Image (tube, rainbow, N blue to C red):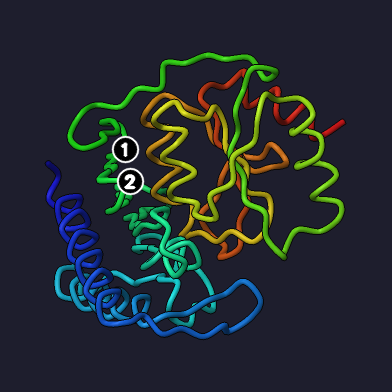
Amino acid sequence: MDEKLEILVSTVKQAASAVQRVREQGIGGRYRAKGDLLTRADEASHALIEAKLKAHFPTVPLVLEEQDNVAVPEGVFIVGDELDGTIPFARGMKEWGISLAYVEHVPTRGVIYLPEWDILVSALKGKGCWINGQRCLISHRRALEDAVWGTELNPFLTDEHRKRYIDRLSKKTHSTRCLACASAGIVELLRGRTDFYVNCRGGKIWDFAAGALAVEEAGGAARRINGALLSWDTIAMDIVLASHVSLLEGVLHVTSE
């Protein structure tokens, strides 16, 4: 395995252990804003990840959710979510995880770890995507009307987002899945349980960097919700991920009408 990718894998596993130890002791928690829960587990994961990454990559800037991020650095940086799905985690659900991506203008290495699903996704640009060490290739080619899709419903969605994306796609597809955890939603796509994933508002760069790389390396497609190519130079982001290009184009067609 690539040395940098190995470090990311080791880091998310250690952070997950730190999170689980805190859960046993009591997670505490406070809302910094509506829909934004911070627990002792988030803080413990952040401390471990920050320390380990600074030790291994002392000159590489970090863009982590639980720190002040004014802007995205140019060039090389590491981006991550120390505890994706804090609210499901705090409610005792299994849909939570930790993600990290090494970015060189675009994500080149990414990991997603969902401890309670016992799933580790790793991806290396130009080399492939793996789930628990097994090569992952998205093979299903369902049409839009047969698709199950994943999304996130949150307080940040405007009425326009709900009408254009949630309502239109719900009417055109077979079923809708919402897990309140971007990492889990993306893994469901990689495993073939869903066919595409849309996060149209409220997401951040750390929610998507590792997952977008994994989906593309597994043979899927990724775009912004307006059809533009992804760029990794802003904190706030939106995304469409699909099992194949024609399905992604169908999603974009429905939501642009």
Query: The C terminus is located in which quarter?
Result: top right
Q: Residue at x 47, y 66 (%)?
A: 91
Circle 2 SS class: strand
**Mark 1 is on which residue type?**
Lys
* Residues packed near mark 1 inside 10 Å, few (<14), some (14 to 19) or many (20 plus): some
| 245 versus 120 height, above or below | above
Side of 161 where 173 appears, left or right: left
Task: Please report whichever mark, 2 or 1, sits nearer to the chain's N-terminal start.
Answer: 2
x, y percentage for residue 100?
33, 58
x, y percentage for residue 69?
49, 77
Query: The N terminus is located in which quarter?
Result: top left
Q: Which residue is mark 1?
A: 125
| 51 versus 183 height, above or below | below
Circle 1 SS class: loop
User: Which label was assigned to residue 108?
Assistant: 2
For the residues labelled 2 and 1, say whether their Cβ atoms are less than 8 Å apart: yes
Q: Residue at x 49, y 44 (%)?
A: 185
- How many dots with numbers? 2
